[in-house]
Amino acid sequence: MSVFVVVLDGPSAAGKSTTARAIAERLGLRYLDTGAFYRALALKVAQDGVRPDDADAVTEVAKRSAIDFSGSPSQAHVFLDGRDVSGEIRTPEVSEMASRVAAVPAVRRLMVEWQRAMAERGPLVGEGRDLGTIVFPDADVKIYLDADLETRAKRRCRELQARGIAVHLDDVREDLGRRDERDMNRPDSPLKAASDAIRVDSSGLDLEGQIAAVLEVVRRHPRCPASGAAG
Ligand code: DC
């Protein structure tokens, strides 16, 4: 029988990462951050001086990249060619570049293959944009986590400021809007809710409320592991 797979898709800064990590911790599942694949590639594309709209060159970079993960959901580390890039891939510049390289179809095909291979390591909670539609169309639980743009911009702003990155709310809102637009309108695997996804809007919820709402949906599934079910 296939492994138990939960997927969370949705726009940037909707709270997917925090929620997916918490669900993984509480249910004893692995955590798969698919955005980190595109971010790690974006970092290498930038460092190699490749133009993100040069699809062939970006695909070449992807083919000679090794992206891997280690650690627990709350302490997840991302490795690019054996180097820990967990911090470096979280800058606004890499976010923008990631959204661009993610629009290249050949890159997506490679990434989807690598992401599916992660499910061979055991049951997981994955987060991204196309997990319910493309990567894991047979996932046991599909959630589309959304929040309005203002809420997401404020959250992302606080998150970046807490990490010492100086940003203004107006710029963050504009960046998010532009990335959403690109992620939702690209021809290949655009961000959208799978027809069988359950929608959760986190705009009016605090972090615990958001985690509780998603956890409730996941726990309803008959194959949901009961272990680690505290909290
Ligand atoms: O979730 P994130 O912000 O780390 O994702 C970075 C970029 O990667 C985002 O702009 C969209 C893209 N992405 C994607 O196209 N498909 C995924 N499954 C995950 C991320």
Image: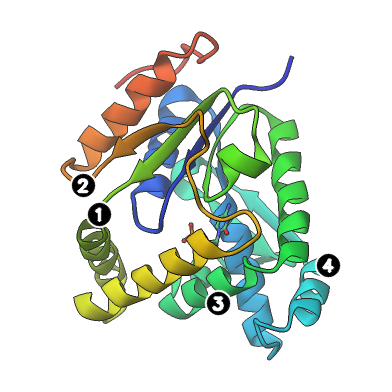
Residue type at mark 2 is Ser
Which residue is found at the position 81% from the left and 78% from the top? 56
- Dot in front, 1 or 4: 1
**Whole-number angstrom distance, CA of label 4 to CA of label 3:** 18 Å
Judge by depth and name the residue closer to the eye, 69 or 201: 201
The local crowd at label 2, few if under 14, some if 14 to 19, many if 20 or more residues have their Cα within 10 Å, is some
Mark 1 to mark 3 CA distance (whole Å): 23 Å
CB atoms of marks 2 and 1 within 8 Å: yes
Question: Which residue in the protein does label 2 denote?
Answer: 203
For residue 86, say whether it is visible: no
Amino acid at dot 3: Met
Label 4 amino acid?
A: Lys
Please state which amino acid type lies under the numbered disc 1. Answer: Asp
Which one is earlier in the sequence, the residue at label 3 or at label 2?
Answer: 3
Q: Earlier in the sequence, mark 2 or mark 1?
A: 1
Disc marking residue 97: 3
Q: Disc 2 and disc 1: Cα gap in Å?
A: 6 Å
Q: Is residue 55 left or right of residue 222?
A: right
Secondary structure state at the residue bearing disc 4: helix
Spatial CA distance of label 2 from label 4 is: 39 Å
Expressed as whole percent of the image width and height from the top left, the position of residue 79 reads 65, 61
Q: Quadrant of residue 29?
A: top right
Circle 2 SS class = loop
Label placed on residue 63 = 4
Residue 123, position as x, y percentages in the image: 62, 27
Taking the spot 67% from the left edge, 22% from the top edge, the residue there is 3
N-terminal of the pair, mark 4 or mark 3, is 4
Q: Residue visible at 67% across and 77% down?
A: 44
Reply above or below: 14 against 163.
above
Earlier along the polypeptide chain: callout 1 or callout 4? 4
